[in-house]
Image (cartoon, rainbow, N blue to C red):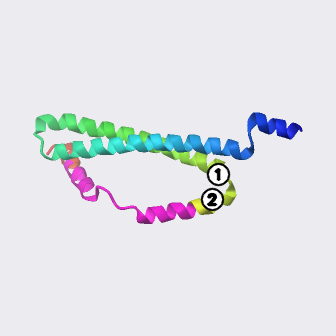
Amino acid sequence: MLPKLLTQIFGSRNDRLLKQYRRVVEKINALEEIVRTLDEGFAETADRLTDCPDSVSTELWTRLDSCHFDLNTCLRETDVLFKSFLFALPESQLEGLDLTIRGLSRTRPAVHAAGASLIRARRTGAVAGE
């Protein structure tokens, strides 16, 4: 009688785990949207930077630095969320998660590879005073 009453009040273990997972998934979805917006802003600013005069480039570099800072903040938050998720995940499900992550990482295409080297080269030149 008492266990049924406690389950009705607090929910079953599965209900509590699902509620915890749902919160993690909602936070990850929000972070994904933020990162997507930052990526678009970063790419747009980097494209504008390649064709801009020096008088505008300082403002664009400041915007890129801001995007970089925001992205790092999101990545740190993602790291904390992922660790929390792994902590709450039953040990019996860890191997399946590992296989899923490894499979997804093999199928993901590289993004902005050429753009990154161009940005790095221009950034190094700007820092060196060129």
Is 36 in front, or is 60? 36
**Image-quadrant location for residue 58:** top left
The answer to whether 97 appears left or right of 113 in the picture is right
Please provide percent x and percent y for residue 66: 32, 36
86 lies above or below 26? below
Image quarter (top left, top right, bottom left or bottom right) of the C terminus: top left
Please provide percent x and percent y for residue 120: 25, 51
User: How many residues crowd around disc 2 within 10 Å: few (fewer than 14), some, or many (20 or more)?
Assistant: few
Q: Name the residue under label 2.
A: 94
Q: Please, what is the dominant secondary structure of the magenta stretch?
A: helix
Q: Which amino acid does label 1 sit on?
A: Leu
**Residue 89, which numbered label?**
1
Residue 109 lies in the magenta stretch: yes
23 lies above or below 109? above
Query: What separation in Å lies between label 1 and label 2 (alpha carbons)?
Result: 7 Å
Is 105 in front, or is 7? 7
**Image-quadrant location for residue 49:** top left
Q: Residue at coordinates 46% horizontally, 40% vertically from top-left?
A: 30
Residue 73 lies in the magenta stretch: no
Q: Which of marks 1 and 2 is nearer the N terminus?
A: 1
